[in-house]
Amino acid sequence: MNHYDLIVVGSGPAGRRAAIQAAKLDKKVLVIEQGKRVGGVSVHTGTIPSKTLRETALNLSGWRERGFYGLSYRVKQEISAEDLRRRLLITLDHEVEVLEHQFSRNRVQLMRGKATFVSKDTMAIEKEDGEILHVQGNSILLAVGTKPFRPDYIPFDNKTVLDSDELLDIEKLPRSLVVIGAGVIGIEYATIFSALDTAVTVIDPKSTMLDFIDKEIVEDFTYQLRDRNMKLLLGQKAEKVERLPDGKVSVTVETGRRIVADMVLFAAGRMGATDNLNLKAAGLEADSRGRLKVNPETFETSVPGIFAAGDVVGFPSLASTSMEQGRIAARVAVGAISKEPQKYFPYGIYAVPEISTCGLTEEEMKERGIPYECGIARFRETSRGHIMGLDNGMLKLIFSLKTRRLLGVHIIGETATELVHIGQAVLNLKGTVEYFVENTFNYPTLAEAYKIAGLDAWNRMGPAVPKDDTVAGQPAEKVTAAETTEPQKKKATAK
């Protein structure tokens, strides 16, 4: 039996980062991947494919230029599913090649097959030819990711009624689409197809969407979606989905309303891919959604020596945070010192338009009783915004009145997922409103919005109070416990 310092099950963001981190510490590492190619859900059906699809759709449709040339403007008049797939395949091939090279140069051993627990430190690997190998590890990291939730009452056929994994293989772009689920995945795909001029209807039993995002940003987002004629049936449950004789699909909601479309995408949640691991043999048990509970600081499960990281442990289910979770878990697993990660991480929603957020929302500020002020900047207020033809887009900064520290940054609009990192850095370095007022930004850039928003807040807050004075009865430099506590975001059920 082959013995390893660390066995990693899964080669997605958490698995790859964990394996490479352990290998760089001169540990013997094995990665087990059941797919034909490395990369996991992130590379093949999740993060990379959906973002590639988005970029291709925006480029070919001429979406970004319509502010100048009108709604009828298109770079390519007839866009096909093959046009979208061609760029996707090129991107995926590159991602796989890079990952395989990383494993090779770091001496990470890769084995393809299905892994199951034999005991808490031993796993059986069933290869494609039926051969079964047994491997043993000092520590085992589960980075198996998730798979789409597929309830029995939905008649999936991989053609007109699909889950989010199957959507990438469609042969023809639908003229009309119903998306069941207004979570992150559902909203991303809904807005991407809307940008391709598909008539889109979104259905969700909740009366609100994206509850972990600042409410003002969601309101702006909702306005933009309705403005381009997307139908949002929130607070209405899809009770019946049936295929019609003419090839279309009918969706009936609880109010009796019936929507007929070319295609239905069911994107109401995902399940941890743990059902085939034989967790009982290791003394583990997953929750009703197949997810594993871990120590949030070490990512160790209830069984010593077994770790889990990535989407399989639940929120926030981001590729970026999964990578960091995998790195921390690997260091703990092999006995290396692991520093506490930075408190604030960005959340990116690659919808059309993009949304990105970091830190506390305005609603969380109110819940914690922190006196605050907001600064707002519209992208159209910047010269770069005019050059790009942007009519929409905004940046919102939230500052503490007592300490003047930035506690939240929320952005909707073009390049939001890039711009947020400026705010993230200021958040983690405990910067104040004065940074944005006194700092110089390149001109013309969308990043100027930070200065505009900073000035907007500063005008209401006024100049800083000397340290020996007080603000609202509190020393100006004192940081309250509410401000230093890590944000507890509401769970994004769509992930």
Image (spheres, helix red, strand yellow):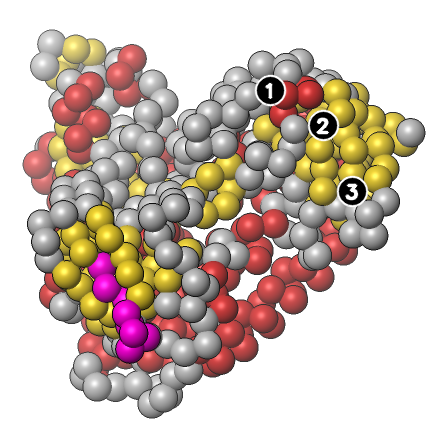
Name the spot of residue 463 as percent of width and height, x first. Answer: 14, 31
Q: Earlier in the sequence, mark 3 or mark 1?
A: 3
In this rendering, the answer to whether 406 lies above or below 182 is above
In this rendering, the answer to whether 36 lies above or below 91 is above
Name the spot of residue 346 as percent of width and height, x first. Answer: 39, 41
In screen coordinates, is 346 left or right of 40?
left
Which residue in the protein does label 1 denote? 284
Q: Earlier in the sequence, mark 2 or mark 1?
A: 2
Q: CA distance from mark 3 to mark 1?
A: 21 Å
In screen coordinates, is 22 left or right of 74?
right
Where does the C terminus fall, quadrant-wise? top left
Mark number, residue 126: 3
> Who's the residue at 65% across and 28% down the image?
278
Element under disc 1: loop
Which residue in the protein does label 2 denote? 117
Of all residues, the one furthest to the right in this rendering is 1
Q: What residue range appears in magenta?
A: 244-251
Q: CA distance from mark 2 to mark 1?
A: 10 Å
Magenta stretch mostly in which secondary structure?
Answer: loop
| Front-most of residues 457 and 97 | 97
